[in-house]
Each structure stands twice: as structure tokens, then as C-alpha cells.
């Protein structure tokens, strides 16, 4: 969602006449799009603002603003701490940015737009020409109120977009050359439940599956408590729906899941994984896992490791619990020492990395169909793309095949990527 919001921000600034630059010293406008889910993300922003302050002192006409969750989370206190800021804008108000920039230029005043959880982004769709894959929000906010999470407070409760509006946007993406859409939201499997039976997530997948030039459909993130059998069946019913699901488990302990207010048990999750692997050939399952949650004992952590060993996730995004004010977890007793949480996190990362590498070994010598997404940012003169089940593949090839589906034989692997050679037609 943050990545999509950044694209929306960039699109508006282009409409204001701005152009992108990689040179901060050359910039007339700097916008930081921020996240407040974890303290580490905020610390990086605070550090960056310290650097920008020096630029602002040298260049008085420079406009600096903060968008995103930090604006809503810290509100006007940001002006007090960083007096050089010109504006702060919450995620639900980024559609106002064009007017905000004009207001700052004309009135030379500080501007704050906060609250108002009614997104209106349908007329600010970022230009996706030349993009092989595009993020497309189908809903905003979240109504789950997990005890550690600030999203409902910063982005509001779940609000689904109208199905016709989404389909229209997918068709526009298709006409611009996009071949893969990634449906995004804090909980996409909740989609439609607030639309009075006008649409369901399964309906949406069916409609997009029928759009000719779209070759692949992905979605992120799914919540286990809302992953129905109907949605699971979509993987086999609609061939463009890719065999990959990101299904956050968060903890392997029922006690911790209850304290987190996750709404499911380990048994429920295990049953979902069993159904997915039974119904969907070669499905890849990725997850989120948090360690160091209040009252997590060493035994609870061992339960998490045991579950990771049992399920063998293809990848896991692992995090240390980060206390956030306004959440129930912030007030809980038995907060885990930071040193212990860090040790558990490192142990989990090491454990999962071995599993991820082992999972990738089975692709060696296999032939995979890869959607070529572009040039690798890390390896010069190499292309990258993804298999249908979300495995990243690096290979040599000409840029003119970007956007195409190609056959690649896998000749190497590590814990994160596969390496391959294109098969000649």
C-alpha cells in the first residue's frame, strides 16, 4: 500500500510540473512517504529529516513534507520537532497534494491534512505505461484491530472499492501494456464484505481473469480468518490466479495468537495450509512472523520454530515486536526484553533461511515459465522475472523481451533467488 501511495504522490507532482531527480541537492520539493507499523521505520525517517534540515537551511525555497502513517500517528507534534517542515498529510488525504503544494507556494504557511478516512484516489491513477506488473488497491484500512497494530487508527476501518471501478482500472492497465496485476490491501480476503453483497473477492478474481491481456493475477495480504474455501477454489477455477499466497501466521503459539487478537488458532492455520497444498499444484506459501510479543516465553518461541519446521514456508518476513501507543499490546504486562527479542529474531531468520534455500533446491534443472519484469538492479546486464508461484529468477537476456513470458531452465539457486538460462524457441 505504501508503494502504491508513493506512485500516487509522484503522479500528482508530475501533474504539478515537477520532475523526478536522484540528486537531493537539486530538488525543489522533497516528500517522505512514511510508515508507522514499526519503530525502526520511523527512526529511519527521523534520521533522514536530520539530513534534510541541513539542505533546508541552505535552500530556503525548498519545500519539505511528510506523507503517510507517521503524519497521522504523530500529527502536529512533527511541526514542533521539525520546525522546517512545510506540510504533513495522512494516507487518506494524499489526493489533496496538488492543492497543498499550491497553497504553500501562495500563502507561505504550514499545512496539515489529517483524519478523513475516505479515500478518493480513482482520478489519480498513476501512469503505468511500460510497467509489466502493477499494484492495484482494492480496499483501504483494516477492521481487525490486532492488538499490536496501528493500521486501523491510521488508515481507518476496512473500505472496499466498487467492483466496476476496479475492473475499469484493470482494463486501463491492460491497455497500457501491463501484464500482471497485484491486488493489494491490508486484508484483501475481506474484500466486499462491506458492500452489501454487491461483490465478493471471488467475483473480483473471476472478472479480472476474463480480461484478455492480463496474464497473471496476484494478491496481498490475506488474513487466515477470512480465507474461505470459495477463495481457495479460485486458484484452480481461474487459471490466471497465480499459485502463491502470503498468509501471515505471526506466531506458532495459540496463547500468543489469542493475545494478538488474530482470530484463529494454529490448528485453523494448519488446516488452511493443508487445503491449499491439496487443491493448488506447486503453491508457494509465504508468511509474516513476529517475535518478542508481550508474554512470549521461550516455550512459545519454540512453538513458532516447530511450526516453521512443519510448514516449511517458502519465505518468511520476520520482525521483532515494536510497541505502538494506542494499541492494546502497548499496555500489556510482561514485555519481552529487547535483547531476548533480538536473539529470537536472529535465530528465526537463520532457521527460515535454511528452509528457504532447501525449498529452492527442488527447482534445479526444472523448466519454469517466467514473466520478464526488467533489468536487475543488483546484477549488471542481467534480467529478472518471476515464476507463477513468485520465485524470482535471474538470467541473461536482451531488454526487448521485457514483458514477455519465457521458458527458463534453472541452473542455480540460493535462499532468495533462482538462476536460469533462457531456452531458445
Image (cartoon, grey):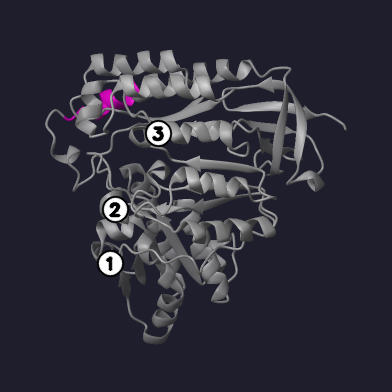
Q: In the structure shown, which secondary structural element does the residue marked by tag 1 occupy?
A: helix
Residue denoted by label 1: 79
Q: Nearer the viewer, residue 88 or 215?
A: 215
Residue denoted by label 3: 228
- 380, above or below 233, in the image: below
Q: Position of residue 137 (x, y in %)?
A: 47, 53
Count of numbered labels shown in the rendering: 3
Closer to the N terminus: mark 3 or mark 2?
2
Extreme residue toward the front, this view: 197
Q: Nearer the viewer, residue 286 or 329?
A: 286
First to last magenta residue range = 335-344
Q: Position of residue 385 (x, y in %)?
A: 68, 38
Extreme residue toward the right, this view: 425
Q: Residues within 10 Å of mark 2 (few under 14, many from 20)?
A: some
Kindly identify the residue that appears in the image at 17 percent across and 41 percent down. 328
* Label annotation for residue 157: 2
Q: In the structure shown, which secondary structural element does the residue marked by tag 3 occupy?
A: loop
Amino acid at each position: 500500500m505504501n508503494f502504491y501511495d508513493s506512485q500516487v504522490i509522484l503522479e500528482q507532482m508530475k501533474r504539478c510540473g515537477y520532475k523526478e531527480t536522484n540528486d537531493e541537492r537539486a530538488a525543489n520539493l522533497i516528500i517522505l512517504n512514511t510508515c508507522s507499523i514499526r519503530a525502526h521505520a520511523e527512526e529511519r525517517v527521523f534520521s533522514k529529516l536530520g539530513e534534510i534540515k541541513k539542505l533546508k537551511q541552505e535552500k530556503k525555497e525548498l519545500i519539505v513534507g511528510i506523507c503517510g502513517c507517521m503524519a497521522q500517528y504523530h500529527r502536529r507534534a512533527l511541526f514542533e520537532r521539525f520546525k522546517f517542515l512545510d506540510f504533513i498529510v495522512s494516507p487518506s488525504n494524499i489526493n489533496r497534494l496538488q492543492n497543498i503544494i499550491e497553497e504553500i507556494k501562495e500563502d507561505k504557511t504550514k499545512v496539515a491534512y489529517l483524519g478523513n478516512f475516505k479515500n478518493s484516489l480513482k482520478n489519480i491513477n498513476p501512469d503505468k505505461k511500460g510497467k509489466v506488473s502493477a499494484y492495484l488497491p482494492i480496499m483501504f484500512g483494516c477492521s481487525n484491530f490486532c492488538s499490536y497494530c496501528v493500521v486501523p487508527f491510521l488508515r481507518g476501518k476496512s473500505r472496499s472499492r466498487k467492483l466496476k471501478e476496479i475492473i475499469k482500472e484493470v482494463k486501463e492497465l491492460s491497455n497500457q501494456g501491463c501484464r500482471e496485476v497485484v491486488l493489494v490491501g491490508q486484508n484483501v480476503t475481506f474484500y466486499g464484505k462491506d458492500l452489501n453483497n454487491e461483490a465478493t473477492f471471488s467475483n473480483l478474481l473471476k472478472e479480472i481473469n476474463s480480461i484478455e491481456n492480463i496474464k497473471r493475477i496476484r494478491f496481498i495480504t490475506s488474513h487466515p480468518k477470512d480465507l474461505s474455501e470459495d477463495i481457495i477454489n479460485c486458484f484452480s477455477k481461474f487459471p490466471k490466479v497465480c499459485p502463491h499466497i502470503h498468509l501471515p501466521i505471526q506466531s506458532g503459539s495459540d496463547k500468543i495468537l489469542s493475545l494478538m487478537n488474530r482470530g484463529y488458532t494454529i490448528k485453523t492455520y494448519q488446516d488452511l495450509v493443508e487445503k491449499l497444498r491439496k487443491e493448488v499444484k506447486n503453491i508457494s506459501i509465504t508468511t509474516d512472523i513476529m517475535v518478542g510479543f508481550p508474554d512470549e516465553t521461550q516455550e512459545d518461541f519454540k512453538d513458532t520454530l516447530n511450526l516453521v519446521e512443519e510448514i516449511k514456508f517458502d519465505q518468511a518476513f520476520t520482525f521483532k515486536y515494536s510497541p505502538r501507543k494506542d494499541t492494546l499490546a502497548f499496555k500489556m504486562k510482561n514485555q519481552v526484553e529487547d535483547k531476548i527479542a533480538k536473539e529470537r529474531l536472529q535465530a528465526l531468520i537463520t532457521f527460515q533461511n535454511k528452509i528457504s534455500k532447501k525449498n529452492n533446491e527442488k527447482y534445479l534443472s526444472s523448466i519454469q515459465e517466467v514473466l520478464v519484469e526488467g533489468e536487475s538492479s543488483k546484477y549488471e546486464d542481467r534480467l529478472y522475472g518471476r515464476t507463477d508461484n513468485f520465485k524470482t529468477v535471474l538470467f541473461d537476456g536482451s531488454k526487448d523481451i521485457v514483458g514477455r513470458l519465457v521458458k527458463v531452465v534453472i541452473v542455480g539457486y540460493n535462499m532468495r533467488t533462482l538462476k536460469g538460462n533462457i531456452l531458445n524457441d
